[in-house]
Structures are given as C-alpha cells and as structure tokens.
Amino acid sequence: MAGEQLLGMIGSRGGKANEYADLVYGKVISTAPLSVQLDNKMVLPEAMLTLGLHVQSHKVKMTYRDRTRESDGERTEIVTIDESLKPGDGVVMIRGDGGQSFYILEKTEGET
C-alpha cells in the first residue's frame, strides 16, 4: 500500500530519469575551500557539497579489552577517526534532485 502510494507520487512528479538522484564520481581538487571535479570536468564548489560522516574527522565511542599489567577489564574511550578528504581522493557522491546539491558518500579506491 505504501509502495503504491510512493510510486504514484514519483509518477505524478514527471520529469526525466536523469533529473532524479543518482550516483556520480569525482576527484577532490582542493580542500580549503573544498571543491570536487566530476568526470565531465565540471567543478563543484563547497556550497554545493555536503559531507558524509565517513569522509571527515569524527569522534567514535569505542569499548575494548585492556590487558595491561594494572588492569584486565573493559575500557571505553572516545577516539577521533580522521578520514578527511585530501586533494586527489576519489569520491562517490549522490547527486540531489536537479543537480544543485551533492552528498559525498564515500572515498573510492585510488583516484577516479
């Protein structure tokens, strides 16, 4: 029932298939300010980009077994994971409706 309603909403929207969200690939060309070049050589400025959690520095709460001489128990710490983008990084992005915004989802293996 919900699926039929969703299909109806999509169908009533109209437009071409390439106007909907899709995956695109690019390469980071600068980080301050952030800019990404698409395969077709178009350069996306920072204002059009949104970063996913795993392509930036973020904090994670981790629990692990501490087996030092002083203790043998679990420890919980907050650690910083730095997966910040660097020039030359290949990225996978989701192009938003109409191509006016791009969500950087993940890094790719090597450069694109």
Image: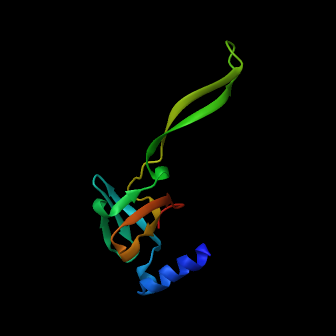
Q: How many marks?
A: 0
Image colouring: rainbow
User: Which residue is at a point 59% across and 34% down the rendered structure image?
Assistant: 62
| Residue at far top of view | 70
**Rendered-image quadrant of the N terminus:** bottom right
User: Which residue is at a point 49% across and 58% down the rendered structure image?
Assistant: 107
Q: Nearer the viewer, residue 89 or 46?
A: 46
Q: With 101 as the anchor, is 58 left or right in this view?
A: right
User: Which residue is at a point 44% across and 60% down the rendered structure image?
Assistant: 104
> x and y percent of residue 92 in the render?
48, 65
> x and y percent of residue 53 in the render?
47, 50
Please determine whether, in this image, residue 96 is positioned above or below residue 72. below
| Residue at far front of view | 1
Q: Nearer the viewer, residue 42 or 16?
A: 16
Please determine whether, in this image, residue 80 is positioned above or below residue 52. above
Please determine whether, in this image, residue 91 is positioned above or below residue 66. below
> x and y percent of residue 15 in the render?
41, 86
User: Which residue is at a point 32% across and 64% down the rendered structure image?
Assistant: 48
> x and y percent of residue 57 in the render?
44, 44
Q: Nearer the viewer, residue 14 or 75?
A: 14
